[in-house]
Amino acid sequence: MRPEIPRRPVSHITDSEFEALAFGSEGPVLVFFGSRRCKICRQLFPVAEAIAHDFQGRMNVYGVDAGKYRLLFQSLRLRGIPQLVLFLNGEVKVRLGGFHPHPVLVEQLKQWVP
């Protein structure tokens, strides 16, 4: 029997999946907009993964390549990467740009995530 390979906590999604997953979800959804070429994004990604673990079962966390899906990034009126956007019941509740340490993000998200 082969061991099960654990799923990465942050699922990467495309622009075509975004609307259904972010706006169509009934619970909280955190979307990490970034790029592999961005140094700060690479530093924030492990923090986003830790957040996904902390809120597992209570919030979905997705990653979007802001360079590849530039029109989606622009349609949300986001400026600069990295950006963390929290959606709750289809509405944007929190936008956080730049790097934030894990404890700061947990405090910001606790008020929105049951």
Image: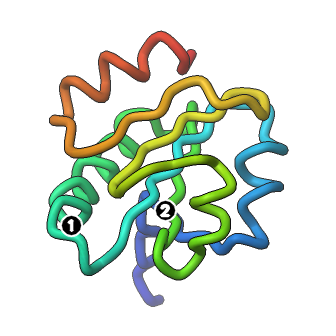
Q: Residue at coordinates 38% horizontally, 64% vertically from top-left?
A: 34
Three-letter amino acid code at the position of disc 1 = Arg
Q: Residue at coordinates 30% horizontally, 78% vertically from top-left?
A: 36
Q: Nearer the viewer, residue 110 or 57?
A: 110
> Is residue 61 rendered to the left or right of residue 45?
right
Three-letter amino acid code at the position of disc 2 = Gly
Quarter in which the C terminus is drawn? top right
Q: Position of residue 22 (x, y in %)?
A: 71, 47
Gap in Å between the C-alphas at discs 1 and 2?
Answer: 12 Å
Q: Which mark is residue 63?
A: 2
Q: Earlier in the sequence, mark 1 or mark 2?
A: 1
Is 58 rendered above or below residue 14?
above
Q: Residues within 10 Å of mark 1 (few under 14, many from 20)?
A: some
Q: Which mark is residue 110?
A: none
Q: Position of residue 3 (x, y in %)?
A: 40, 81
Q: Position of residue 19 (x, y in %)?
A: 79, 56
Is 45 rendered above or below residue 1?
above
From the image, tell me which residue sits under label 1.
Answer: 42
Q: Describe the colour scheme in one phrase.
A: rainbow
- SS type, badge 2: strand
- SS type, badge 1: helix
The image quarter in which residue 74 lies: bottom right
Q: Nearer the viewer, residue 66 or 30?
A: 66
Q: Residue at coordinates 33% horizontally, 54% vertically from top-left?
A: 82
Q: Nearer the viewer, residue 64 or 6?
A: 64
Q: Position of residue 80 (x, y in %)?
A: 37, 55
Q: Nearer the viewer, residue 75 or 106?
A: 75
